[in-house]
Image: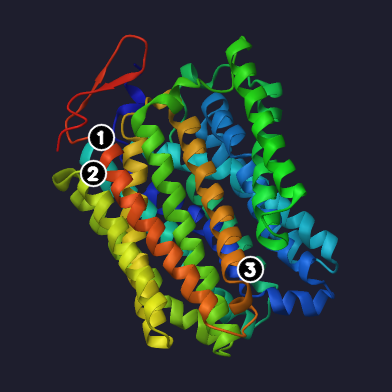
Amino acid sequence: MNEEIRTPHPQRWRILGLLGIAQLMLILDVTVVAIALPHIGADLALDREAVTWVVSGYTLAFGGFLLLGGRAADVFGARRLVLAGLLVFTGASLLAGLATSGSVLLGGRIAQGLAAAMLAPAALSLVVTIFEGDERNRALGIWSALGAGGAALGVLLGGVLTAGPGWRWVLFINVPIGLLLVLGLRTRLPAQPSAYARGRIDLLGAALVTAATGTLIYGLIRAGDRGWATATTAALIAVAVLLYGAFALRQRLAATPLMDLRLLARRPVTTGTLLIFVATALTIAVFFLGTFYFQNYRGYGALPTGLLFLPVAVTTMIGANAAGRLIGAVGARALGSAGLLVAALGMAIPSLMEGTPAMTIGISIVGAGVGIVFVVASATALGQIEPQEAGLASGILSTFHEFGASLGAAVVSSIAAASIAGTAYDGFERGFMTGAIVAAAAAVVAFLLIPGRRRFASVPDGAESLEGAAGP
């Protein structure tokens, strides 16, 4: 093992702060734009479907290219990918903010998503490799707090900017921030050891997995808009499954495969991706249902809605930071299960009681629970990853993050269709009760699957066995 990358970097906490701001910017760009959609649609004369794709185009490109971005970080170096991703994201934000038509805006949003797919796994892999032990857990706690709380902060920031200088500034604000981050990180990021920078990317494998992921995310987005029980939805999901099968076959036959499929067979990685999937689905469900409840059902404007989501950002950050500090002492199993039970409790409150106070309290409790789960998911999936696998593992985790976001939005939009139109509350009840049931069931699954507190033992083929994984 190359020890150079394991040596604590003297500026690691400053690097974490800068990378955290970059990650926050990527997460913000989902909800900060979502809150401005009515104004964007009116200004550019976009119909409902075109307005939907202003958000979906970003998440589709982001999720579809994450595995490629993660592997590229391992081959070319995470430092290069972070700086290139920031520059492309900054330029794409400027293009989208200057757009005078829906097609230009969508092009800018897709370019933002591609840049995010380059940046996100590379940044997370740097966090994993420059920190060790308990410091890594605390760093992942801060990272998860910024990422999870960023969605709520995006609603508030989007409301402030839309009500103030206008919707274009939800995109323009990325330009100075992106340029400052490039300047700050360029001299601080560690150079990548050449041992990890050699190699080639399996372009056919990359095309297959990108097409599969993009098709699946598109199918999930479309299902929420057009319905699950349609031939087109079934066909898209079937095509995605076939493409994933072709990708798996390609990885077995390729001389330089895009990824080692045995990585997915490792219990910690599988469990971490499941947790990130559930936590993100719950988070997006909260923002989706809460935003429509406050704006369409209660009639609040963009800024008041953003302010009502501020407690969610605070509780999410508190939960994530607490988890980062406690996970070493308490253990991932107990903490992950507890976080999901807290999220289930929060989801149950607005399903049983109607009113703005009940909704605000409930979604804030959910924020605390998912903040805990995000940390447990990252620590579980990435805690035993080798440096040369960090980019790919981060890409896998980020991909399931996008899967969770797409599925969460698609499911709740179908369950709460009537309530989203602002005509009744029963759809919100069903949506939140479904979330409570999913969170409670996931808590049981997490307790059974999350490895115990004893260390993993390395085995010769590079896989890992679990000592005492079934024990407490």
Placement of 56 over or under 383, stated as above or below: below
Q: Name the residue under label 3.
A: 33
Furthest toward the bottom, the residue is 299
What element does badge 2 sit on? helix
Query: Which one is closest to the eye, mark 3 or mark 1?
Result: 1
Q: Is residue 201 left or right of residue 134?
A: right
Q: How crowded is mark 2: few (under 14 residues within 10 Å), some or many (20 or more)?
A: many
Residue 73 in percent (x, y) is at: 54, 31
Name the spot of residue 158 as percent of width and height, x first: 58, 74
Compared with 297, 392 (above or below) is: above
Per the image, the residue denoted by label 1 is 451
CA gap, disc 3 to disc 2?
Answer: 36 Å
Q: Name the residue under label 2.
A: 333
> Which quarter of the rendering shows the N terminus?
top left
Horizontally, is 91 left or right of 28 in the view? right
**In the rendering, which numbered label is found on residue 80?**
none
Q: Judge the density around disc 3: few (<14), some (14-19), many (≥20) Cα neighbours within 10 Å.
A: many
In the picture, the quarter occupied by the C terminus is top left
In this rendering, does residue 189 appear at all?
Answer: no
Amino acid type shown at disc 1: Pro
Task: Pick whichever, 168 or 273, lies toward us.
Answer: 273
Does the residue at mark 3 contact the one at mark 1 (Cβ under 8 Å)?
no
**Marks 2 and 1 close (CB-CB < 8 Å):** yes
Up-down relation of residue 399 to residue 40 (above or below):
above
- For marks 3 and 2, the one nearer the N-term is 3
- Check whether the beta carbons of the residues at disc 3 and disc 2 lie within 8 A of each other: no
What amino acid is labelled 2 in the image? Arg
Q: Position of residue 139 (x, y in %)?
A: 31, 48
Quarter of image, res 300: bottom right
Residue at (54% x, 89% y) in the render: 298
Q: Measuring from the top left, give residue 340's x and y in whole percent.
A: 32, 56
